Image (cartoon, rainbow, N blue to C red):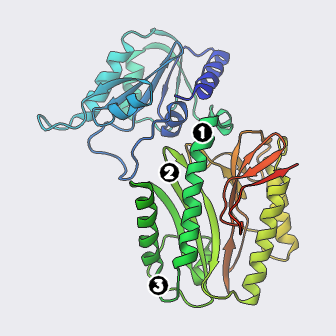
């Protein structure tokens, strides 16, 4: 369990006069408990959907299938199990889930304000909830916890350190093994195997791994392109480790960089350095975004079309979003990825990304892949 998260949830619901809540977003449930639902193979035919959380009177109970109930219980939260996988009858897992929900709600108040994370809620579950509590007043709470989740607990920060260490390992592997003639997908296969063998198990992972002119397209999945001498090779890797997501990006060179590509790399590297040095509590996300975009523009290059950064946690993209609209001030305890870039269709692109922990005095850089000595660096505002 995450005591900081549970206390924040209680405070929010108390302030809103909410008596109970049905929580459905997997990232919310991971934030509250540390439970990491399996996502490697997508929706399961043996479940009525991802686990659900029922909050009432300060207590949280999960509804989970018989395949996941043990993993949920290991997180320290109460669990109501329903039959998902079975060989004794057809797979009526949704019927079993909604029956378990109705049974759980049988002891709940029939009146009062009930919050719902509805964006991720299956229609059958929503209908069962409303039918079971006909006199309740329902309010949506999607996104209500985004700012609470942005400031990490000590345990969350340690999980994020482990996740970004995997990212650093990935960049080191590519730096040592990428060579002319190797295809992007061959390199990815070797890299994925190295990461999973090193961790001792499979990991969910998102990746951009592209070489040559494909780097100007910002990213993409590895394919059959074979690397050529002088190519840029962009790796943006986002693995989930113990429920939390790491992230970093480097643009490697296959052999020596050409003069223009070297200039672009230095511009992006300096932009990232200045951004890291600027991070401090109270700085608005939009102002950090503007600084990075301005540095790229003043260097004479087109401004990149994507975000300048984002928070990391139980989701791989969360608050604070480092984007032009966002007035959210940075706070100590936030963990953010910063990722400026330059993309030129005629020669390729460069993106570099570091992950930092906002501290009372500035920030700590958690990633090491862009530092020659591999040591931690603290920046004080």
Left or right for 56, reference 62: right
| Residue at x 59% of width, y 54% of height | 164
The secondary structure type at the circle numbered 2 is strand
Total number of numbered discs in the rendering: 3
Q: Choose top left, top right, bottom left or bottom right for residue 175.
A: bottom right
Left or right for 244, reference 352: left
As displayed, is residue 366 above or below residue 371? above
Q: Specify the label residue 182 is tagged with.
A: 3
Dot 1 or dot 3, earlier in sequence: 1
Q: Position of residue 285 (x, y in %)?
A: 78, 48
As displayed, is residue 338 above or below residue 326? below
Q: Choose top left, top right, bottom left or bottom right for residue 102.
A: top left
C-alpha distance separating marks 3 and 2 = 27 Å
* Residue 88 seen: yes
Q: Nearer the viewer, residue 332 or 323?
A: 332
The secondary structure type at the circle numbered 1 is helix
Q: Nearer the viewer, residue 246 or 19?
A: 246
Label 1 Cα neighbours within 10 Å, binned few <14 / some 14-19 / many ≥20: many
Left or right for 357, reference 299: left
Q: Nearer the viewer, residue 357 or 216?
A: 357
Q: Is the residue under label 2 in contact with that under label 3 (CB below 8 Å)? A: no
C-alpha distance separating marks 2 and 1 = 13 Å
Q: Position of residue 315 (x, y in %)?
A: 56, 46
Q: Is the residue under label 3 in contact with that under label 1 (CB below 8 Å)? A: no
Label 3 Cα neighbours within 10 Å, binned few <14 / some 14-19 / many ≥20: some
Q: Label 2, on which residue?
A: 240
Dot 3 or dot 2, earlier in sequence: 3
Q: Specify the label residue 156 is tagged with.
A: 1
Q: Specify the label residue 96 is tagged with.
A: none
Q: Is the residue under label 1 in contact with that under label 2 (CB below 8 Å)? A: no
| Residue at x 88% of width, y 71% of height | 298
Q: Position of residue 101 (x, y in %)?
A: 35, 22
């Amino acid at each position: 369990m995450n005591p900081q998260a549970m206390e924040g949830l209680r405070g929010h619901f108390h302030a809103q006069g909410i008596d109970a809540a049905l929580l459905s977003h997997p990232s919310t449930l991971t934030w509250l408990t540390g439970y990491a639902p399996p996502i490697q193979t997508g929706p399961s035919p043996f479940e009525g959907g991802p686990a659900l959380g029922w909050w009432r009177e300060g207590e949280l109970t999960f509804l989970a299938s018989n395949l996941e109930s043990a993993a949920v219980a290991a997180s320290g939260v109460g669990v109501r199990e329903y039959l998902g996988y079975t060989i004794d009858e057809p797979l009526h897992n949704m019927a079993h889930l909604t029956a378990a929900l109705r049974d759980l709600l049988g002891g709940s108040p029939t009146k009062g304000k009930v919050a719902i994370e509805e964006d991720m809620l299956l229609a059958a579950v929503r209908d069962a909830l409303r039918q079971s509590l006909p006199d309740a007043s329902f309010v949506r709470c999607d996104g209500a916890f985004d700012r609470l989740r942005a400031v990490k607990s000590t345990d969350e920060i340690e999980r994020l350190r482990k996740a970004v260490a995997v990212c650093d390992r990935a960049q080191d592997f590519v730096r040592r093994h990428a060579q002319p003639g190797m295809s992007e997908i061959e390199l990815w296969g070797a890299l994925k195997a190295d990461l999973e063998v090193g961790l001792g198990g499979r990991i969910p992972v998102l990746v951009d791994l592209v070489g040559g002119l494909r780097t100007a397209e910002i990213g993409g999945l590895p394919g059959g392109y074979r690397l050529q001498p002088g190519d840029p090779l962009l790796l943006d890797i986002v693995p989930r480790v113990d429920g939390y997501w790491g992230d970093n990006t480097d643009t490697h060179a296959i052999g020596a960089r050409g003069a223009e590509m070297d200039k672009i790399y230095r511009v992006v590297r300096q932009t990232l350095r200045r951004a890291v040095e600027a991070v401090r509590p109270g700085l608005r996300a939009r102002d950090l975004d503007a600084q990075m975009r301005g540095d790229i523009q003043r260097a004479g290059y087109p401004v990149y079309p994507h975000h300048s950064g984002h928070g990391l946690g139980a989701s791989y993209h969360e608050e604070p979003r480092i984007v032009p609209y966002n007035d959210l001030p940075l706070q100590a305890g936030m963990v953010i990825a910063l990722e400026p870039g330059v993309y030129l269709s005629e020669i390729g692109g460069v993106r570099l990304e570091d992950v930092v922990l906002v501290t009372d005095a500035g920030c700590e850089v958690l990633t090491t892949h862009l530092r020659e000595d591999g040591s931690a660096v603290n920046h004080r505002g």
